[in-house]
Image: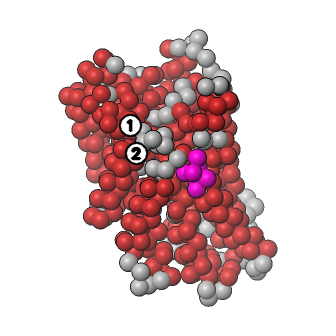
Amino acid sequence: MSLHQHEQSKGINLFTAICIVVANMIGIGVFTSLGFQLEGIKSGFALLFLWVVGGVFAICGALAYGELGAAMPRSGGEYYYLSRIYHPMVGFLSGWISVTVGFAAPIAAAGMALGAYFTSVFPQAPAKLIGLMVVIGVSLIHTSTIKFGSYFQQVFTILKVLLIVVVIGCGLFFTQPQELTFLPSGTDFNVIFSSPFAISLVYVTYSYSGWNAAVYLASEVEKPEKNLPRSLIIGTLIVMGLYLLLNLTFLRTTPISQLAGQLEVGYIAATQIFGSSGAKLMGLFISFGLISSISSMVLAGPRVTQIIGEDIPVFKILAKKSSRGTPFYAILLQLSIVIVLLITSSFEAVITYLGFTLNLSSFITVLGVFVYRLRYPDAPRPYLTWGYPITPIIFLAISLWILVFILMNKPVESLAGIGTLFIGAIVYLLVARKQLKAS
């Protein structure tokens, strides 16, 4: 097989990789969190600055992951990086989180949210069943060829972005602006260093999560040493721009008094922009847009499971690919976990504690850029982190603050996350350790 044929067989080009990052990042967070931010922050400048800080945090993480992805272009994300940089056990624990709940819980949450928004337009439709049908349908699509799954991802991501652009365009150019200034004032400095700003930042960074999505499929990306860093950085910049413009649209079109403390800011703003039918339109829009979010996670999650199956013989069935080249059994395992979470609705508690475990995983991974350079100074690095060491340090500082905040304010969920890691450590010691050493 020629190099050109080999790259073509991979099936995921730069555009698809960017779509995966964008779709993974844009969920329901940006349509719901502004109302709670407005309870403690009334400054237009401070509110937009909040989303700038969240975007800078995500971009700094993407820059660091880009270096690791280009240097170690194999699927699996943190599982593979942490195994190589630190120790196989550290990588296994990260992979354990990804396989058990890291992707399944957000997919289940997105499925439930999709069903809820759909039934807001069609009240007779069963919300849970709608979510279940979409998740199963999308999973089956991705058991087909990688090429077909890529086209599906591209189409739904483009449609999602176009719909957001339509909302932004209509809101900024066809409505009467509210009396709210977005220029900085003398009091904004105090607001930015206030407790409400800090609390809001935790939820803003959660809205930006998913900026690392493409690394989980590195083995299937064409020219990963170039396209992985590009997809992470370009995808994150696109989402940052959309988030800023969307929040500007919400604030410019709708009185603060109507948005403050409300969960459904998307509905409320849509009513202002499109009239009385706006809420239903936004409900359909969000439910439709969530299909691409579900699709991107269905694409990414099983690749971690597949790599673990390749490395650990006891899990080798999960590494098996179908005749079409997709990780069939890994997709089915993830789908099974998602169905259980959807039916029992137990994913709500899982989502809360995921914030701690996933932040911890990304913190250790970005720290790994420093460790990898020290341990393997002569390793090939097709891409070097822009702004090193400042950009990784910015990410680590914000990430550490978030970890401390979650640990102090959500101790039960944080301990649950640590407990999950403890169970993973037992599985590693009993099953995986000897097999990883032997492989």
Three-letter residue code for mark 2: Phe
Three-letter residue code for mark 1: Lys
Q: Can see residue 44?
A: no
* Figure quadrant of the N terminus: top right
- Marks 2 and 1 sit apart, C-alpha to C-alpha, by 7 Å
Q: Nearer the viewer, residue 65 or 138?
A: 138
Q: Nearer the viewer, residue 103 or 329?
A: 329
Position in image of residue 409 (x %, y %): 36, 53
- Looking at the picture, does residue 405 appear above or below residue 255? above
Where does the magenta region start and end?
A: 147-153
State which tag comes first along the sequence, 2 or 1: 1
Residue at (62, 63) in percent of width and height? 160
* Circle on res. 320: 1
Q: Dot 1: few (<14), some (14–19), or many (≥20) neighbours within 10 Å?
A: some
Query: As drawn, is 366 to the left or to the right of 133?
Result: right
- Looking at the picture, does residue 360 appear above or below residue 261? above
* Secondary element type, mark 2: helix
Residue at (56, 81) in percent of width and height? 280
Position in image of residue 232 (x %, y %): 62, 41
